[in-house]
Image (spheres, grey):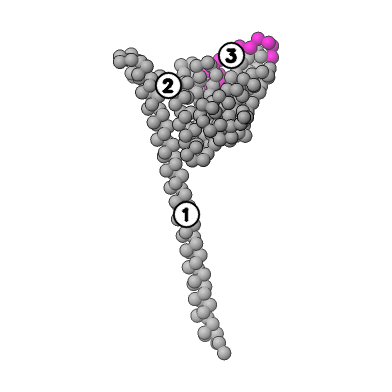
Amino acid sequence: MITGWVVLPLVLAAAAAAFLAVLVVRERRAAAALAEHITDLNARIADLEATNAAIRSALDAATDALGPDPTAELARDSTSALTDAATGLFNEQFFRVTLETRVSAARRHLRPVAVVLVQVASGVREGSPTPTDPAVVAQGVRATLRDADTACRLDDGSFALILEDTPENGAVWTVERVRRALAVHHAGQTLWAGIACYPAHAFDAWELFERASNALGAAREWHQDRIEVATSE
């Protein structure tokens, strides 16, 4: 017959083994979480390095365009070569370099990225549309976008947004927030937007831009606020 004095050590040994097993599982989970965190940090560092490289490339191109003897004013403020004078947002040159970088990063990390083209006009409903003051649009854009996103003003006067880690529905919601911000502070504006997302609509940066441009063209056919999303065809 097994007495209590014999059973008790067996129970204690089993309890100790179970406790050790739980500790091992917890340690393994903690190690896995730490490894995942390190991987995410490395990915973010790679993205920052890619963005810095894009900025350096754009600055080099701007310096080359200025010639061997740039003016003292531009030498003191080299960032002026990358920004739009009317809004303070980045210009088309910066957009072109950054778009390729962000799509490459999205492809590498299997994350979505959205390209949004925006135009805003007043007097559309009255039949006499005129472009809205770009500084007004820039103000609404700045109040809406996250720090990780990029806002630019292109040479044709339209606005281009690059939204990090953003699928189609998130891009639509971002544009809607811009529209509401303009409606609250500057009533009577009409906003048109075209959206294209990687990888839903295209895999190449400039194909993505082209699809967003086509979507913007479709939106402009409406005489009211309109957000059009590109198709994958």
Report the span colored magenta.
125-143
Quadrant location of residue 221? top right
> As displayed, is residue 96 above or below residue 165?
above
Precedes in sequence: disc 1 or disc 2 = 1
For label 2, the crowd category at 10 Å Cα-Cα, with few meaning under 14, some 14 to 19 and many 20 or more, is many
Residues 2 and 136: in front is 2
CB contact under 8 Å: marks 3 and 2? no
Can I make out residue 62 in this image? yes
Q: Where residue 186 sits in the image (x, y, percent)?
A: 61, 19
Which residue is found at the position 51% from the left and 40% from the top? 110
Q: Where residue 138 sits in the image (x, y, percent)?
A: 53, 21
Distance from label 1 to label 2 (Cα)?
Answer: 42 Å
In which quadrant will I find the N terminus?
bottom right
Label 1, on which residue?
Answer: 32
Q: Where residue 193 sits in the image (x, y, percent)?
A: 61, 24
Distance from label 3 to label 2 (Cα)?
Answer: 23 Å
